Structure formats: structure tokens, C-alpha cells
Image (tube, helix red, strand yellow):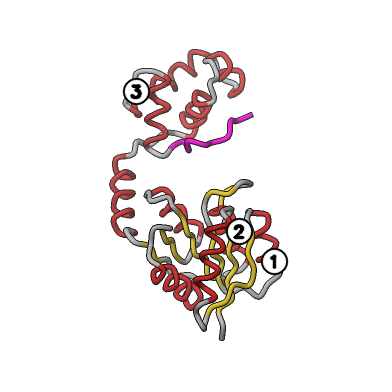
Amino acid sequence: MTIQVVIVDDHNLVREGITRLIDSEPDLAVKAQASSVAGGQSLIAEGGANVLVVDVTMPDGNGLTLARSARATYPNLGIVVLTMHNDDDTLLEALDAGASALVLKSSSADDVLDAIRRAASAPDAFTATGLGAALRRRDTVSAAKPILTPRETEVLMRLVDGDSVANVARLLFMSESTVKTHVARVYEKLGAHNRASAIMSAVRLGFVKPDRPKTN
């Protein structure tokens, strides 16, 4: 059986290069390609694909979001995340999204082809170079990560959004003195002296995503 591959990447040269690589293999074929998350969703919905090869950064969203939705809807679809981002967050997010593999764009052609074939045969088995080390680093950070109460987390999110103590009190239906108490506890747990250092610590510890949308 020929493994049918859908490629989703916003760079034409990357798509064309991967297409030539895949079509040169007798057991692989490119079924279709797209340059956006929306385009990828449409192609996957058409059916017939065995493996999705998807980039992370897209003009209309995140390829990992596409990977997550594809995994939820098509459990037997192989999903290969092909990215230039060589960091723990991207690797672990790909794992959490249900991808079958993460391969760096700097990898060899054989590595890419091997990942596609493994994804087709074992879509629910994640592979990536450096996975064990990344998991150990995550466990180390988690062990050292302070625990915030739900209320402290709400206050922290409002501080990140730039709200004043008065606004936090109004939005969360608390007195200003209570808000100040929560703020002091958040600062203490995060080892911060002010709002700016609290936000930096919150991002570093994973409480807040750097690109988190502002709360209404």
C-alpha cells in the first residue's frame, strides 16, 4: 500500500522540497498540500490521507492546533510535526497534541522519511530526538514549581493583563485589601519583588504563555 501524505507548510520551497523527497520513494506519495491551517483542515476532511506533515508556525494559526484537532477526529492518522523550533516547549506541545513524531527541518532526508513511515504504521507512538532529556527537564521544573491557589492564579492573570489593584478588585468581586494580600502571596511564591518580575517568573515557570491573549 502506498502511504498517502498531506503536507501543510506556508513556505512554498519547503513544500516543494518535501514533495519531491516523498514522491521519489516507491511506497510514499503526496496526496495534497496546503499553506495554512484552514487549508490543512479541509484536505484532511476530504479523507484518504495516511500521514499529515505539518509545520508549527502558520499565517492563520498554529500547526500544533491542527495536529491536536486532527488527532481528536482521526485517531489512525499519522502526524509528523516538521519544524525549525528546536526547544522543549515545542517538542512537549507536539507530544501533548497527539503527534506521532517531531522532526527538525535541519534533519536529514532519511530522518524525515523514517518519521513518515513510522507515523503511518504507529500513529499513536511519539518519537523525537531529545524527548527523554526534555521530559526530565520538565519534571525538574515541575518539581520546583510553586503551587498557586485558584484565586491567586486569577489575580496573577489580571496582573499579567495590566489591571490595577482597583480593577482586579472590581473584576473579581474582592476588596482591594484582599487583592493586595493575594498579590503579596503571589510575589512571595514566585520570588518576585514587583509586577514585572512576577510576570517574568510566571512565564518562566509556565503559568503564563508568552503569547497568551488578554483576558476580557
Lower position in the chain sequence, tag 1 or tag 3 = 1
Q: Badge 2: how crowded within 10 Å, few (<14), some, or many (20+)?
A: some
Q: Residue 171, percent across and down? A: 61, 22
Q: Residue at x 30, y 49 (%)?
A: 137
Which stretch appears magenta?
207-216
Report if residue 215 lies within the magenta region.
yes
Q: Secondary structure at mark 1?
A: helix
Which amino acid type corresponds to the residue marked 3 in the rendered image?
A: Ala
Nearest-to-viewer mark from 1 and 3: 1
Q: Main secondary structure of the magenta part?
A: loop
Q: Residue 68, percent across and down? A: 56, 58
Q: Which mark is residue 45?
A: 1
Q: Which mark is residue 69?
A: 2
Quadrant for the C terminus, please.
top right
Q: Nearer the viewer, residue 54 or 150?
A: 54
Q: How many marks?
A: 3
Q: Residue at x 52, y 82 (%)?
A: 27
